[in-house]
Amino acid sequence: MRITSKRPVLRSLTLPFVSGLVLLLAMAYAHAHSGDRHWVRRYDGGLSTTETAVGITADARGNVYVVGDSTESTTAGADIITVKYSSTGRRSWVRRYNGPSSLDDHAKAITRDRYGNVFVVGSSEGTATGSDYLILKYDRAGRLRWARRLDGPGHGKDEPNGLVVDRWGYAHVTGISDGESGVRNLMTVKYNPTTGRRVWARPLGTNGHHAASTAFPAASRPLVVDPSGNVYVTGSTGTTPPLQVLVKYSREGRRLWSNAYRMPGSIGIRGWHVTRDRSNRLYVAGTVEWPTAGDTDIVLTKCEPKRGKRLWVRRYNGGSRVAYGMDDEPSAGLAIDHHGNVYVGGFASNANGWERFVALKYNSHGRRLWARSYVRGHHCDRASDLAVDAAHNVYLTGTSLLTYSSYDYQTLRIDAGGRLRWLRRYDGAYHRFDFASGIAAVPGGVYVTGTTRDGTATATNVTTIKYTP
């Protein structure tokens, strides 16, 4: 009689069991720890300095780059600080920029390219030139590769707020710039990645019509580049009422078209953010203001790329007195996923002035899939930035008033179906005023940065946090 070994059978039964058990444990671990705080890092430039966070970006390895301002009590003005952390929270380097006049230098935005280079844009007081555009390029080791300035034709206020890098590494900057005739332009500039040489600079507003009416908020993303190198910029005019602007430049800087959109019955419509889908159709998020005092809505517009024609417009008020913020403080952001769904973040307030976080999701046809609002503080929850990850989770961060004298960071995750998965607060060590200003979501980490009070009457630090997605 032949005896057959049972070991192969046991092995075949054991492997699926073990694999399944490992998978279940991994899923349980991931679920149990979602939203956990991994680390908190404070940057304090010294006993005599005050730091303020402006923006954040992160790469696929979890390296985090934070930009902000630092002011020493013994000097005349602020400097721009850039800080890099590893995924474990180790501080890799800190760089400080002080302009030629040693006056005010203020960061406005930060981004990176696929090679690990970091680009920072801001405004910098020149010598007899007023405030100038400033762009800095650092390599991954923190070495300053170049710094370039732009003094506009009016030698007055030149303040960039938007920054994007294309697939070739060229940096594109937009913002406001005073012209010779006193007209405030939307100025867009392209820089060579290797030398920092200015490739082209294009003002929009020399005819008095497309003049920029106001500076952009710090969290705005007013320009985007398509795979062919075409550049799209949004903003608003200086007319009464202000109109929402959208302009397209070719890779060589030729203006292909510019449109100024209005909304019937409104007393002003503005553009704050622009993004595109895989077909280069454009989405612009902004605000529209109505004649009733304080009545402002979120407005989302879809446009085709050839002429900028509007395809649809959607407004969100949510039964509120104000949605998305006041017209000079709008912001939490705009993002798109690979299915073409569009996400808008902001905040809304009712007639009593009670504010709450707002997140909206639309499909590519303009149908609103869901709208969510959250308030966990003392009726004053104001979102400042938004991010969406590859699994279509939405992350909002901002500030929440816990008591009448204590503001905390507030960060939340909403899944693709609109369900709140977690909400986390951060109360700084000194339980004072903690204001979150930026968020970045990459595989393995959600990073939030902001400004926290350090226990003195006026001094603040830049505080950055890592959460599990």
Image (cartoon, grey):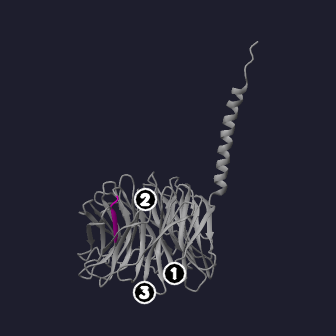
Instruction: Give SS at disc 3.
Output: loop
Q: Nearer the viewer, residue 226 or 144?
A: 144
Residue type marked 3: Ala
Q: Main secondary structure of the magenta part?
A: strand
Tag 1: amino acid: Thr
Can residue 388 be spotted in the picture? yes
**Image coordinates for residue 105, horizontal then vertical, percent:** 40, 79
Who is closer to the viewer here, 16 or 383?
16
Queried whether the magenta region covers residue 350, the answer comes back as no
Label 3–label 2 contact, CB within 8 A = no
State the image coordinates of residue 303 (x, y, percent, origin top left): 35, 60
Write down the residue under mark 2: 116
- Residue at x 70% of width, y 34% of height: 14
Q: Residue at (28%, 57%) from the top-left corner?
A: 306
**Precedes in sequence: disc 1 or disc 2:** 1
Could you say which disc has been placed on residue 285 in the image?
none
Lower sequence index among marks 3 and 1: 1
* Mark 1 surroundings: few (<14), some (14-19) or many (≥20) residues within 10 A: many
The kind of residue on which mark 2 rests is Gly
Label 1 to label 2: alpha-carbon separation: 28 Å
In the rendered view, would you say 281 is above or below 180?
above
Identify residue for label 3: 76
Q: Is 346 displayed left or right of 30 in the figure? A: left
Determine if residue 263 is in view.
no
- The residue wearing badge 1 is 50
In the rendered image, the quadrant that contains the C terminus is bottom right
Q: Which residues are magenta?
A: 169-174
In this rendering, the answer to whether 172 lies above or below 69 is above
167 lies above or below 453: above
Secondary structure under tag 2 reads loop
Between 198 and 294, the one lying in front of the other is 198
Q: Nearer the viewer, residue 246 or 423?
A: 423
